Image (cartoon, grey):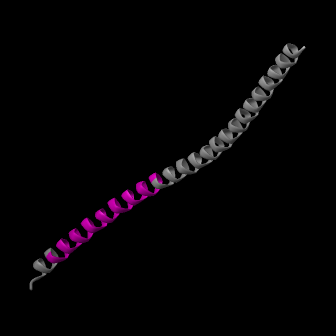
């Protein structure tokens, strides 16, 4: 081989290495974007989990209020019925 063909071969190989390095950079950038997206998704899911816990707590509190209101209403109606019966019995 002459010097010119060896030099041409070296340049070709360097060009191939340069292309691979560019590919690695692209892959790294894509991986970094994917990591950022995954971190955002994790943060969002953690916030959603906290909000769901708050909603469950609020639902339980609303259920307690509803039960208390219904029981109060039933007792009030029973008192009214007893008062009516007492008035009619006299």
Count the numbered circles shown.
0
- For the C terminus, the quadrant is top right
Residue 14 image point, x, y percent:
23, 72
Q: Is 50 left, or right, of 15 in this rendering? A: right
Residue 37 image point, x, y percent:
45, 52
Front in this rendered view, residue 51 or 60: 60
Q: Main secondary structure of the magenta part?
A: helix
Q: Which residue is drawn at the image coordinates 13% and 81% (left, top)?
A: 3
- In this rendering, the answer to whether 32 lies above or below 5 is above
Front in this rendered view, residue 63 or 51: 63
Q: Which residue is drawn at the image coordinates 26% and 71% (left, top)?
A: 17
Q: Is 54 left, or right, of 79 in this rendering? A: left
Q: Which residue is drawn at the image coordinates 83% and 19% (left, top)?
A: 85
Residue 81: in magenta span: no
Q: Which residue is drawn at the image coordinates 75% and 28% (left, top)?
A: 74
Front in this rendered view, residue 7 or 21: 21
Front in this rendered view, residue 45 or 57: 57
- Find the residue positioned furthest to the right: 90
Residues in magenta?
Answer: 9-37
- In this rendering, the answer to whether 28 lies above or below 59 is below
Q: Quadrant of residue 24?
A: bottom left
- Find the residue positioned furthest to the bottom: 1
Residue 60 image point, x, y percent:
68, 42
Residue 65 image point, x, y percent:
73, 34
Residue 27: in magenta span: yes
Q: Is 79 left, or right, of 43 in this rendering? A: right
- For the N terminus, the quadrant is bottom left
């Amino acid at each position: 081989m002459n010097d010119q063909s060896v030099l041409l071969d070296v340049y070709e190989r360097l060009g191939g290495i340069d292309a691979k390095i560019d590919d690695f950079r692209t892959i790294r950038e894509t991986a970094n974007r994917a990591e950022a997206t995954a971190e955002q998704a994790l943060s969002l899911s953690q916030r959603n989990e906290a909000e769901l816990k708050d909603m469950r707590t609020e639902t339980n509190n609303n259920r307690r209020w509803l039960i208390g209101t219904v029981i109060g209403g039933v007792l009030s109606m029973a008192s009214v019925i007893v008062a009516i019966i007492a008035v009619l019995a006299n």
